[in-house]
Image (cartoon, rainbow, N blue to C red):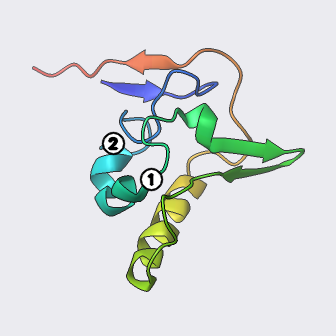
Amino acid sequence: MRFEVRNGVKVLFWHDMWCGDQPLKVQFPNLFRLARLRDATVHDIYSWNGTQHYWDITFTRSPNDWEEDSIISLLSFLADWNVDGLPEGDDKIIWSLTS
């Protein structure tokens, strides 16, 4: 099961599979452990100011030098997701059918 994010209100940023083939907490476990808002929704993390958008991910402490590459990788990964803001409408569940 995966999600198609529309308004991002019901999709958990770290826990749900919405961006990629695994939840972000599995793809970036060291950042998940540092995350201040582990149960935040996509809507909670995604912010915009007029025409500019950004991911407002906060951590419990400043990252160490060796963790900065992971943050850059996460932000690069998210940059490919959606650059025009969240679309209107409710989030959708997409069921995967396997034989």
Q: Residue at x 62, y 32 (%)?
A: 43
Above or below — where is 54 with respect to 44?
Answer: below
Q: Which residue is mark 1?
A: 35
Give the residue drawn at x 31%, y 18%: 95
Is label 2 in a helix, a strand or a loop?
Answer: loop
Image coordinates for residue 19, horizontal then vertical, percent: 44, 42
Mark drawn on residue 23: 2
In terms of depth relative to the viewer, which is nearer, 36 or 65?
A: 36
Q: Quadrant of residue 1?
A: top left
Q: Amino acid at mark 1?
A: Ala
Q: Residue furthest front?
A: 61
**Amino acid of disc 2:** Pro
Q: Secondary structure at mark 1?
A: loop
Q: Earlier in the sequence, mark 1 or mark 2?
A: 2
Q: Position of residue 87 (x, y in %)?
A: 69, 28
Q: Residues within 10 Å of mark 1 (few under 14, many from 20)?
A: some
> What label does residue 25 carry, if any?
none
